[in-house]
Amino acid sequence: KAGVTQTPRYLIKTRGQQVTLSCSPISGHRSVSWYQQTPGQGLQFLFEYFSETQRNKGNFPGRFSGRQFSNSRSEMNVSTLELGDSALYLCASSRDRGSTGELFFGEGSRLTVL
Amino acid sequence: SQQGEEDPQALSIQEGENATMNCSYKTSINNLQWYRQNSGRGLVHLILIRSNEREKHSGRLRVTLDTSKKSSSLLITASRAADTASYFCATDSNDYKLSFGAGTTVTVRA
């Protein structure tokens, strides 16, 4: 069974640009969550989607957005990039999320903003 | 903001020794989970303990949970070089997200 796939794995952008990150969950998993990981702030929750509906959103500015498609694949977008957006962006999937069970994480997309 | 705080921040042990790390959290939880992360990689789920459980074992892992003190501990017995990683506790408060602690970096020396 294929794991969670995130693309691209590495990317470099400049300030002011925008970026779109993609996440394909494990087959059969309908919940997708996104986390930002930085040395200073640790792992911060961005958003969670289930059946194309955002059920929770973290404390991030509106420049951070996401969506989920009918096949459960998800994308997140960051517009008007800032230096502080440099981070490892992690996607995780689970079968459902009434109460959170085990999350399966991808390897992450490492974004560097210059 | 992070729900959990982990202690110690870093731990260095000899192969074969036990490693213990602690996690404290602030709000009521549905369950608490522990994850491992090898340098720059994704997180791997280790174990989940529900709020009505006090102790759980999985292989060389032992997790305890004290909801009255809002704390948990993870014990790794007979450590191996492959256990070198960062370990995170994460709490689920039934709000469709996990809140992670800052993590404990464990180095196992051969």
Image: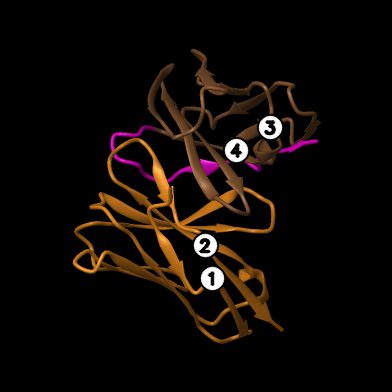
Residue at x 54%, y 32% (from the top left corner): A26
How would you classify the magenta stretch by its main secondary structure? loop
Residue A63: say if magenta: no
Task: Classify mark 2: helix, strand or loop.
Answer: loop
Residue A110: say if magenta: yes
Residue at x 66%, y 70% (from the top left corner): B82
Q: Which residues are magenta?
A: A96-114
Query: What amino acid type is highlighted by mark number 4?
Result: Gly
Chain letter of the residue carrying label 3:
A
Q: Colour of chain A?
A: brown
Q: Do badges 1 and 3 share one subunit?
A: no
Task: Classify mark 4: helix, strand or loop.
Answer: loop
Q: Is residue B10 above or below residue A67?
A: below
Query: What amino acid type is highlighted by mark number 1?
Result: Gln
Q: Which residue is mark 2?
A: B103
Q: Colour of chain B?
A: orange
- Where does residue B50 sit, x and y in percent of width and height? 27, 55
Task: Classify mark 3: helix, strand or loop.
Answer: loop
| C-alpha separation, residue under disc 1 versus residue under disc 3 | 29 Å
Query: What amino acid type is highlighted by mark number 3?
Result: Glu
| Front: mark 3 or 4 | 3
Residue at x 19%, y 59% (from the top left corner): B52
Q: Which residue is mark 3?
A: A82
Q: Which residue is mark 1?
A: B9
Say if mark 3 contacts mark 4, CB within 8 Å: no
Say if mark 1 contacts mark 2, CB within 8 Å: yes
| C-alpha separation, residue under disc 4 versus residue under disc 2 | 24 Å
A31, B104: nearer the viewer: B104
Residue at x 41%, y 48% (from the top left corner): B99
